[in-house]
Amino acid sequence: MYNIGYINIYIIMNLNTNQKLAIQCINRPCLVLAGAGSGKTKVITEKILYLINSCNYGDRSIVALTFTNKAANEMKHRVQQKICRTTHCSIYTFHSFGMNIIQHSLHLLDFRPNFFIIDEYDQIHILQKIVQKHAQYDLSTLKKILKFISMLKNNLLNYSDASKLQEYQNKIEWLKYYYLYESFLIHSNFLDFDDLIFIPIKLFQKHKNVRVLWKKKIKYLLVDEYQDTNNIQYIFMKQIIHSNNFTLVGDDDQSIYSWRGANPQNMNLLKNDFPTLQVIKLEENYRSSGRILNIANTLISHNPHIFHKKLFSNMHYGPMVKVIATQDEYEEVKRVVREILIHRNKFKTSYQDYAILYRSNNQSKILEKYLVKKNIPYQIFGKKSILDQNFVKILIYYLKVIINPDDDFSFLKIINIPNRRIGNKTTTILRTISLKKNVSLYKIGMYIDSNTKITMKIRNKIKNLCLLIQDLQNFASVKPNNILKKIIDDIEYIQFLKKTVKNQIQFNEYIKNIGLLLNSMENIKVYDNKKENFSALSNFISQIVINSSEFSEKNIKQIDQDQIFLMTLHASKGLEFSFVFIIGMEEGILPHYISIKNKDCLEERRLTYVGITRARKELTFTYTRKRMLYGNNISMNPSRFLDELPQKDLLWLNKKNISSFFQNSKIHIKTIKKMLKLKD
């Protein structure tokens, strides 16, 4: 363990002045404005060590909250490495911490032990079943209803509260669905993502003693990526703060998630809610060349700021930033790949030193095809979670039914996989009996009698499924870490996939993804107690769902393989590469057409800023003069963001006269509107 003297020497020797100030600011609210590449994770982990070793804070009294499980695990690893012992610091994602509070207060809530977290896929299916009794809605409308429900929860409104407000009287039908949706969740022992923050806040409001208890537990709070918090997370944070002892670390210039509720104005609220707030700026960048930082600073200066900061670096200024014009998206892809191959050959670099960033996923399709054609290795970073694949998710439903056989929603998902020839007519009969007798489908299936209109053959198949669930329950109560392998073996799942999935490449992908799920289950702790084993398995499922965005195909592949990285600008946040290409720098692409239409390009500018600051050594922009959009070949104009950059730092290649491109952009946007049949 470090002694106090060593900690102080370590801070003095290895941190810059403002990093030291951020770490040693303890007795007042602290906001650390951490610019890209300024060492924010180092500051957070060193502050945890400082609190423990120099300020006599107990491990368990410190809570750090972040947005991804990956970031939380990295912090834990760094702290444990430095402290030279196992630490009990509570480092969570917001949602995991909310779940922890709920688990400790189940006796005060409407939920039972071993509840499940549902994702958007399950939410849509549940809502679909609810609304189909009243009306027929397409997927787009169902998503809008879910967004409406999410908005109400993020404004801390349950059905009873919302139904009394005049502003929602034009949404009576949707409010009814909110009530039915919540009733279904409570009955099924389900929670959605919003509940993981909504329920703890409601719990604190109703039971003041519970809030006081948690405030006593949390002597010091740290929050990473504070700019990504939404309204309800800000309220949640305020409720657990102990005596204004907190440090928030964030960068308003990297706030790029407004579409999922992030509110950079939470920075402004701090000044009003905590008048003694100390703001410390981390402006020294340890990642990028001076020229790249000058470009980033100049671009983001066009946005209004609550707090002003300017990144600087003591590294070399670096080569000119290229801006390459191409005829169309096909030539753009060829040019980018050629630039990489020539550069790699000249400087003896690796493929993994290069990243190609783009605004939307559909921009990668042509790129992928060309890389495959040229036999160049690549990896798409940040693809959808493997849990979005139905053949993987079926196994999760099996696990859920094992823990709670009365989970009718999951039972219906597995009833016919593998194919048991149990049709819709049979499931309708089962549901009717279930409603009439007020018992679960599992219990109906276990004791199904001959008086039903279901044939003996099908009755036996249903009974056998229920007996299988019973057998799997007994196994899971002893060996929860091996239960998935037993499910796969008992239902002959691999053989089923071989018959069902005709495409060999796709089949191999499913097998790899199932393998990833199997490997992750090996970490489930096994207890001597049946109840604790079910609890461990339930917690595993919830964590998989909460962190599903990180539980993706990218984790199967070795990150150290030599391959070019392809990703959206959103997915690139938090990463860095020696050589970065940002493609599609055109009006309507970046900034996106919708942002231009809404006359609000602030977040698009921040998104471009994030992309620029991923580059360590060299940066290249590309744009096309024509691009196939919405089935039409459209003339494109360079992005306004290119015009906002310091021209002395840019090397334009194949440049034509763009002095009047803003005027041309208006014509260009009108063309897109016409094609989409949109009104001004």
Image (spheres, rainbow, N blue to C red):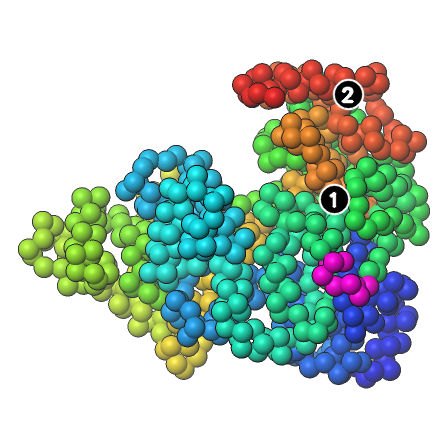
Q: Residues within 10 Å of mark 1 (few under 14, many from 20)?
A: many
Task: Give the class, few, some or many, for how many residues have Cα within 10 Å of label 2's Cα (few <14, many ≥20).
Answer: some
Q: From the image, tell me which residue sits under label 1.
A: 610
Check residue 658 for magenta coloring: no
Residue 274 x %, y %? 74, 63
- Residue 518 visible (yes or no): no
Depth check: 374 or 577 in front? 577
Q: Which residue is mark 2?
A: 662
Residue type pointed to by label 1? Val
Q: Quadrant of the image for the N terminus?
A: bottom right
Q: Is residue 457 above or below residue 675?
A: below
Element under label 2? helix
**Which is more toward the observer, 479 or 131?**
131
Q: Which residues are magenta?
A: 270-278
What amino acid type is highlighted by mark number 2?
Phe
- Residue closest to the eye, 217 or 383: 217
Horizontal side, residue 612 vs residue 527: left or right:
right
Q: Which residue sits at x=83%, y=82%?
A: 4
List x then y, in percent, for residue 176: 37, 47
In this view, the mark in front (2 or 1): 2
In this picture, residue 277 sits left or right of residue 489: right
Disc sitting over residue 190 in the figure: none
- Residue at the (39%, 43%) spot, across then down: 172
Q: Label 1's element? A: helix
How far is disc 2 from disc 1 in space, using C-alphas?
24 Å
